[in-house]
Amino acid sequence: MDLEHLYKQALANDSDAEDKFFAILRDRFVRCAKLKVGSGEDAEDIAQKSLEVVFRKYKQVPISSSITAWVHQVMYYEVQRHYRDKGRTSRLFDYAPDTYELPDQTSVDPLLRRRIFRCLGELVKRNRRYAKILLMKREGCSTEDICRAFKLKRSNLYVILARARQTLKECVEKDPHR
């Protein structure tokens, strides 16, 4: 089941749907927060705080776009709050690549990982929208959710994803010793 459907069922006081809705959100939040902050403990804290906000407000706040976009915005604000509380400004790829672990992909070559992160940083500088779309796709957002969030048609999204991936590929392959 997709998140939108579970959200609508949860609004109709279906407790099973609400449990599934928050279980899916928790997994997405932890994965996304880990990508943003790099620390497992901090990611768990951010995910928990985000879930608390969503739990308190999801039945009260009128959602104009999609529930997925709204909940990820809530999590984004919690990441910003995390960095502000730590006395840092948030940057999309501001962490030490040597200590970062990709979820479910711990066997990735560390040199390749550093090159990918550098190239993602360059992509952010060149086209922040492409980087955001790639990140949402990596976080597991559905095509429909990304299209709604960026007001895109599906075909345009596929073109953007292809261009962003090609840009990353060219950057990574450009200088293999970086």
Image: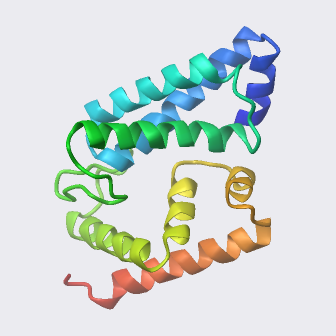
What percent of the width, then of the height, locates residue 32? Answer: 45, 44
Residue 94 appears in the picture as rendered: yes
* Model colouring: rainbow
The residue sitting at 49% across, 70% down in the picture is 128
The answer to which image quadrant residue 87 occupies is top left
Residue 2 appears in the picture as rendered: no
The residue sitting at 17% across, 57% down in the picture is 98
The residue sitting at 49% across, 67% down in the picture is 131
What percent of the width, then of the height, locates residue 137? Answer: 57, 56
What percent of the width, then of the height, locates residue 65? Answer: 75, 45
Specify whether 60 is left or right of 175.
right
Quadrant assignment for the C terminus: bottom left
The answer to which image quadrant residue 94 occupies is bottom left
Q: Nearer the viewer, residue 52 or 24?
A: 52
The residue sitting at 55% across, 68% down in the picture is 129
Quadrant assignment for the N terminus: top right
